[in-house]
Amino acid sequence: MTTLDLIGSSPKFRALLTEVARVAPVDSAVLLQGETGTGKEVIARAIHEASPRRSHCFVAFNCAAIPSALLESELFGHERGAFTGACAQTKGRFQLADGGTLFLDEIGDMPLELQPKLLRALQEREFERLGSAQTVRVNVRVVAATNHDLGQLVAKKLFRADLFYRLNVIPICLPPLRERVQDILPLTEFFVAKFAARFNKTIDSIPDEVVEVLKAHDWPGNIRELQNFIERAVLFSPGSVLRLPLDLKQTVKPRSQSAARTLADADREHILETLKEANWLIGGQDGAANRLGLPRTTLIYKMRKLGIEIRRSPRSRSIRQMADEQCHAAANC
Ligand SMILES: Nc1ncnc2c1ncn2[C@@H]1O[C@H](COP(=O)(O)OP(=O)(O)OP(=O)(O)O)[C@@H](O)[C@H]1O
Ligand SMILES: [Mg+2]
């Protein structure tokens, strides 16, 4: 990802980018804190790319994804024979990031016993590979990230205070998406374009009611959740207009009562609009059910629930005919 993929224009996001530009030129440690999916890794990369270190490596290391027994060797490297299976000398992430940036993701999961060695590597810029007495010197800028409250982990003695202060030289808090509602439209447009290209589809319109539904959601999974949601919406959209498949739309949790009404209204409007487009035909290839990505019987059920009258399409069979067919099919099962 390049900095060009940093989408957002809300005041909070612009303030974040100003912060990135301000901290990028210096070598001080940065601690990124924010809920899951708020873009911590993206911002860590942006800091690297805006820094004088950009021509060197950006090495990302997830402290939670590696078994704790392997963490030391993964971070600092090991000598041949340092442990069973260590058949060659191996560089750790600190050495691989020499001259560049080391991104320590999920730093709150760093085991307490490894924290003193990490502290020394940060402070003295030196360490020993596992099984070696030789000191390795490196020039690495560290950016760490967590979605835990590190201060609280320190209070509970689950994280060393000295390491916390060393990492927290420049603290940056990433705002959750619900506090950057203004960014939902540009992010949606960006993800629609991205997934439409990936799925070889043309989506050239995002209806206002779709945007309203997206804005009303809380997005506990933040930008990642929105991204996944749009990926599915693009996949389900039958034409060139972005549609939120109904089953998907119902998973959207509105923030308030008024938002709940908006959601129900949007559901109703969306079905009505699709029915009109389909000339009130419910089933079949061109029918509204297919356009909405729903089984015909589910759409009929939803229409009844939302009080939408079932009109007879010039091309459709009657509801009675459909009901008879269903009874017939059930009797034959
Ligand atoms: N400003 C942005 N513009 C476009 N895409 C973004 C932006 N911020 C984040 N993303 C996308 O959202 C997803 C989540 O971002 P990222 O992995 O950086 O979040 P995170 O805070 O590290 O999440 P976690 O805490 O779960 O590790 C990624 O696919 C990323 O590309
Ligand atoms: Mg992350």
Image (tube, rainbow, N blue to C red):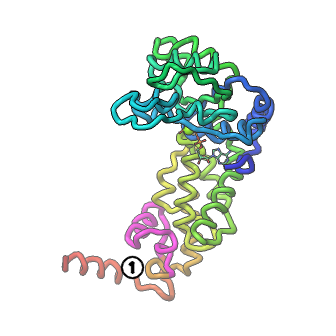
Task: Between residue 311 and residue 20, name the one nearer to us.
Answer: 20
**Image coords of residue 86 (percent x, y):** 39, 34
The quarter of the rendering in which ligand 1 is drawn is: top right
Dot 1 falls on a residue whose secondary structure is helix
Q: Quadrant of the C terminus?
A: bottom left
Question: Is residue 290 part of the magenta span, yes or no?
Answer: yes
Residue count near mark 1 (Cα–Cα under 10 Å), binned few <14, some 14–19, many ≥20: some
Image location of residue 307, percent across then percent down: 47, 63
Q: Residue at x 57, y 68 (%)?
A: 199
Q: Is residue 292 magenta?
A: yes
Magenta-drawn segment: 286-310
* Vertical side of 87 occupied by 266: above or below: below
Kind of residue indicated by mark 1? Ile
> In this view of the protein, can residue 217 be seen by the observer?
yes
Q: Is residue 154 left or right of residue 223?
A: left
Query: Is residue 7 among what the camera can see?
Result: no
Q: Which residue is mark 1?
A: 319
Magenta span: chief secondary structure: helix
Q: Residue furthest bottom?
A: 315
Frontmost residue, 188 versus 143: 143
Residue at the outermost left position:
332
